[in-house]
Image (cartoon, grey):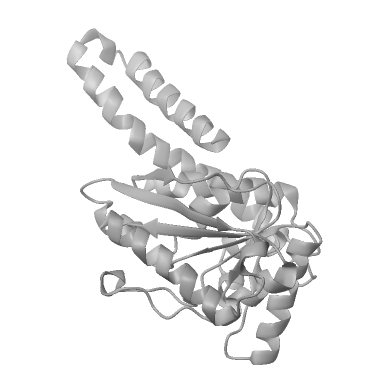
């Protein structure tokens, strides 16, 4: 929230300076212009904030294997994960237990590119390594940063590479490097009103290999953010449905675990609908 606060202070200060030094304060009704200018100036300052971030991204390494997240890169990614949804007028609404202090596997449904952002923001006690498609590592600005944050690309078209990614994710948890976030649906669900896509049981191999707790999260309304932006805000619900200890699922198989997690997420989504 540090970056958000700084941007807000700059927006208010800039608007106030314009209001004062142009003599608009002599006419009381110009106070409305001062208020209306704040969100516009907030966006402008955010774009200015992206300039040094963009320059830094040009010099970040993108070929070397990341053994642990770069703390500075992760700080900026985490701060940006708070600012961007709010720029789109999304307001986080949370429920359920807090994320555990120990390393864990975090899973959720997947309906939007916004999905990892509240997970990264609310997991305050430790970094999150998101399992993502390889194409995201090549994105301008974001790509170099998430690479250096230890995000894990997974090529679902190549079984050998996918297994390597699963093993790396499990090792990150076991070695206390980072918690891992993955969407078992595998790809973004463009029509969540028709229900969730099938959950890939292979995603849960991470938990079995790491013998860690599983944080089951239901995310609601993320897919509405971009559409609602132009005319109303969006209440973005992040519900921690259950934290499943290893002792509870250790005797299950991956498919049973996937089915159970999907069922409790679906139940929460139905409550929100």
| Residue under the point 50% across and 45% down | 82
Query: Considering only vertical position in the picture, is 134 above or below 56?
Result: below
Left-right relation of 27 to 225:
left
| Residue under the point 55% across and 46% down | 122
Query: Considering only vertical position in the picture, is 17 above or below 77?
Result: above
Query: Considering only vertical position in the picture, is 68 above or below 234?
Result: below
- Please state which of residues 132 and 174 is positioned toward the viewer in this rendering: 174
Left-right relation of 58 to 9:
right
The spot of residue 132 in percent (x, y) is 58, 71
Q: How many marks?
A: 0
Residue 215 picture quarter: bottom right
| Residue under the point 35% across and 14% down | 20
- Please state which of residues 5 and 140 is positioned toward the viewer in this rendering: 5
Left-right relation of 221 to 255:
left
The quarter in which the N terminus is drawn is: top right
- Please state which of residues 254 and 73 is positioned toward the viewer in this rendering: 254
Residue 23 picture quarter: top left
The spot of residue 258 in percent (x, y) is 51, 75
Left-right relation of 72 to 84:
right
The spot of residue 174 in percent (x, y) is 78, 63
The spot of residue 148 in percent (x, y) is 71, 60
Q: Is residue 65 visible?
A: yes
| Residue under the point 63% across and 48% down | 100
Residue 36 picture quarter: top left
The quarter in which the C terminus is drawn is: bottom left
Q: Is residue 51 visible?
A: no
């Amino acid at each position: 929230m540090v970056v958000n606060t700084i941007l807000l202070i700059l927006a208010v200060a800039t608007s106030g300076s314009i209001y004062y030094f142009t003599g608009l304060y002599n006419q009381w009704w110009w106070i409305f212009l001062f208020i209306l200018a704040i969100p516009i100036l907030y966006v402008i300052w955010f774009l200015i904030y992206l300039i040094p971030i963009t320059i830094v991204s040009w010099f970040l390494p993108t070929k070397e294997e990341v053994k642990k997240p770069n703390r500075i890169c992760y700080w900026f990614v985490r701060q940006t994960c708070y600012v961007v949804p709010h720029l789109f007028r999304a307001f986080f609404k949370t429920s359920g237990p807090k994320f555990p202090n120990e390393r864990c596997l975090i899973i959720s449904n997947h309906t939007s590119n916004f999905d990892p952002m509240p997970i990264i923001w609310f997991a305050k006690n430790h970094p999150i390594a998101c399992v993502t498609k390889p194409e995201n590592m090549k994105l301008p600005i974001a790509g170099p940063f998430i690479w250096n944050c230890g995000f894990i690309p997974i090529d679902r078209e190549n079984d050998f590479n996918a297994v390597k990614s699963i093993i790396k994710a499990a090792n990150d948890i076991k070695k206390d490097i980072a918690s891992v976030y993955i969407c078992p649906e595998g790809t973004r669900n463009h029509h969540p009103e028709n229900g969730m896509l099938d959950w890939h049981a292979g995603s849960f191999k991470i938990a079995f290999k790491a013998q860690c707790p599983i944080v089951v999260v239901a995310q609601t309304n993320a897919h509405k953010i971009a559409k609602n932006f132009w005319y109303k805000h969006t209440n973005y619900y992040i519900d921690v449905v259950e934290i499943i200890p290893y002792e509870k699922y250790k005797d299950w198989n991956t498919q049973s675990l996937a089915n159970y997690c999907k069922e409790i997420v679906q139940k929460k989504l139905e409550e929100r609908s």
